[in-house]
Every structure is written in structure tokens, then in C-alpha cells.
Image (spheres, rainbow, N blue to C red):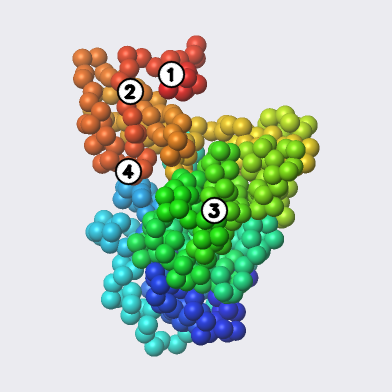
Amino acid sequence: MNLAHLLQRRALQHPQRHAIFSGTQCVASHGEWASRAARVGAHLHAAGLAPGDRVVLFMRNHPRYLELMFGAWWAGLVVVPVNAKLHIKEVQWIVDNSAARWAFVTSDVAPDPAALTGLDGVMDAESAACTAWLEDGAGLPAIEERAPTDTAWLFYTSGTTGRPKGVMITHRNLITMGLTYFNDVDPIAAGDAIAYAAPMSHGAGIYAIPHLMAGARHVVPASGGFDAAELFALGRQLGPLSLFAAPTIVKRIVDEAEAAGLSPAQCGQSFKTIVYGGAPMYAADIQRALRVMGPRFVQIYGQGESPMVGTALGRAHLADASHPRHAERLASVGVAQTPVRIRVAGPDGEPLPAGEVGEVLIQGDSVMAGYWRNPEATAAALRDGWLWTGDMGALDADGFLTLKDRSKDLIISGGSNIYPREVEEVLLTAPGVAEAAVVGAPDPEWGEIVVAFVVPLPGAALDSKVLDAFCLDHIARFKRPKRYEIVDALPKNNYGKVLKTVLRERL
């Protein structure tokens, strides 16, 4: 089954129902969304793209994101969503690695589309040419048939080994995710509305699938991003919103509610459900959120390799303050979602007893097909039918998973993944730098911030501002260190490995 059939089904049943909004303005009904997606698919076929070819979406949050994404699927193509915060050099690497044929961009993130090379075409999603693609009177083609195991979403995630890896997410993976939302996260009614305040290139964007299944509305804030006051106002005008948010965003929404003196009931006029994940949420923060805004929160834990599906800590668990282990459960990430099994295992893959810490494993129909053109990484991550997540945790006797640490050196800042080696590799090419080590430091607002320990070459004098400018020229702004510690040497073990635990202790 092709995911585009979900859109066609909804358009056939309710063609006039409002579907996509830019702020408070409806810009597409379900019928219009489907016809525009079909036309995009037809034009991509006419441009020579064949089923299975890759199409990059390097865009800020935009109403056309949904039309172009489903247009690519209509033609049987693979969507390659790219974080709009990435540096153009990082995007080019993804274009090359995925062997993409086409890209849609917005001018704010790609002011010079010609800077992306090796593509058959690059189109500004806000251009007159794109409008013509969406609105012309060409005949509408049939949806390209795809197998459930065909890749639909090629999501680039990184590891501590350096370059990003392309996670092959299939049509079955995403349909599984969509159906799971109803059972384990939140029921959806046709009158509901999902707001895209977090990047549509990540989990927020694929939550379009369950909301399309229900025939709900899709709201892209006029700002194209996150603004707490804007979201409160949108909710009051359009009806209570649902959204996916990193803990940093949740905290700012709660700050806005508290500053405005809103009661939980008044918050309910703007928000139906806030799903949070992507980074740890401190127990004190969720307790405050519940106190200020009421029981409208759900936590999920998943990975790019099992998108949005792993565990869930639902409203009932969060609200059950009388339970003797309520405090422990608030600090957990919940229980296994319906279509998966969760195991905490030792190095041999065997399950560990309740309470013991091991690596978190996931098994089920949400788990990726593998890494794009990377059999070694695939073999390391997928073993005996289980996804080895690299996260460390413990299961209690009731099946609640509590994350303890990460076996990888991943830093999660404001819900965005930052991989130390990417930053270290850039710093090591900076003039005057002999060695560099990057770690995360706790931060009350961002969860973690990036800190770089840098050793100068003999006789060199390093300046933090110069290092910062160098990083900004090579990697995305959100990845650059927020602090630079110039040190004489890095702590190392007998094998010459940098002891990052010692660096973290210094912080």
C-alpha cells in the first residue's frame, strides 16, 4: 500500500472538508490537497523520475510541505526530509549520498538553489513554477503501486562514527506508526487540528499521517515555527490544537501559560494534546506542566529507526498521582506501544531482570528496513529481529522503561540531535587547533548544550569567537558549541582514548 492512498481515500469521502491551514486561513481542502499531490506526482514523472527515486525536501515548515510530500509518494518516490537548520554543505552530502534526483526548497533556507548540485531539478516551493505544478489542469495520474516493504521516507540520522546514516522507513513502518497513535498516544476526531511548530522534517511531520487517517486539520503557524503566544491564539481561533514538541518547547508553552495567568481550563481552549519526546523531560518540569495546564500531555519514546514508536507514557499514567510509584513513572518513558516489544538486554541480547540496566532493544513492524547503502551499520543495529537502539535503560516489574544513559555520545539540545564527532571533525580543521573533544553539559533550558574542549597547536593562540565563526561556516548553527574551553591537554586513558567522562565531570 502506498501512503498516498490515505490521502485519496480521505479526498473521495470528504473532498470539501478543510484540510491544510496557513495560520487561520484554509489553503486546501482534502480534495484540493489530493489533486495538487497528484499533479506534483505527474510533473515529477514527466521530469524523468521513476518509482523509488529520491526527492529532497529542504524547507522550513510550510503548507506546501504536505502537498509536495504526498505528491512524491503519489508518484512512488522516496521522500528525503532534511532539517532546515542544516548548512548547505551538509545538505549537499545528503543529496549525494541518497543519489537524489530532485529537491524542493524554500528560499529562506536555500537562497541560492543552484548551490545544490547533482540534481535533475531544484524548485523553490514558493515560486510561480511550483504554483503552476500544483494548480495546472493536467490529467491526474493513478497512484503508483508500492509494496509495504518499499522505502517511503529516507531519514538521515547521525552516529558517533561521523557521517549521517540514511534510515530506510517503509510504507508499512509509517502506516504502523499512524495506527498506533490512535491506540497508544491519543484518539483523533475529524474536527481536531495538528499544529506544526516543531520541524516537519522530523517526527512532527510524520504525525501528519494519523491525522490524515482521521480526516483532521493540519495547521502550519504563519511564523513557520514555534511561538508560544501564536499557538495559544491559533488554538483559541481554530479549536484546541495537538502538537509534537521537544521538552524545550513544552517548557516555553508552560512559561507562556503561567505568565498569562491562564487556568488549566483556559489552556484547554488552545491545546488538546501535547506529545513530548526527543529528549529527556525532567520530572519536575512535567509536574509543573500538569499543574499549570492540566492533563493534556503524553510522552513518547522512539528513534528515527523506529519513528515515534517505542514506548508511551499516557495521560492516565501521568495523572495517576495516587499510585505508589507515580514519581518513578513520571521519570520513565512509559510502556511498550502496541505493535512493538521492548527488551533491556546485555551484550548477548538476552533479556535482563527487572531493574537491571542494559541496552534498549525494539522489535516490531515500526522498525526500519535498514540503513541506506550501509550493510555494516545495518548488521550492527538489526540483530536477530531486534533494533539495538544504543540507549541504556531499565524496565521495572510493570513494564515501565526508564532511560539511564546513552551508549553513544549523542547530545540532545532542545530536541535536536547533535553528534560530537561531526563538531570535532570541523574543529580539527580550524587553524591552530591540535585536538578537540565535544561533550554535552546539562542546561535548564535546552536540556544539554554543546561544549568543546580545544587544545591549541604549539605557539598558537586560540580565540573562541574565531572558532565560533569557523564552525558557523561549516556546520549548522544549532550544532556549534555554546562554550569553548581552551585547555593544555585532554585527559586520556592508556590507549590514548579521550576520557569524556572526566570532561563531563569538569563541567
Q: Quadrant of the C terminus?
A: top left
Cα–Cα span, label 1 and label 3: 37 Å
Inter-mark Cα distance, 3 to 2: 40 Å
Q: Do callouts 2 and 1 mark residues in contact (Cβ within 8 Å)?
A: yes
Residue at horizontal 37 percent and vertical 82 percent from the top: 135
Q: Which of marks 2 and 1 is nearer the N terminus?
A: 2
**Of the pair 310 and 79, the residue shown nearer to us:** 310
Q: Which residue is disc 3 drawn over?
A: 293
Picture disc at residue 485: 2
Amino acid type, mark 1: Arg
Q: Name the residue under label 4.
A: 477
Q: What residue is pinned by disc 1?
A: 506
Contact (Cβ within 8 Å) of mark 1 with mark 3:
no
User: How far is mark 4 from mark 2, CA to CA?
Assistant: 19 Å
Q: Between residues 191 and 7, which one lies in front from this camera angle?
A: 191
Who's the residue at 32% across and 48% down the image? 87
Distance between the alpha carbons at the discs numbered 1 and 4: 25 Å
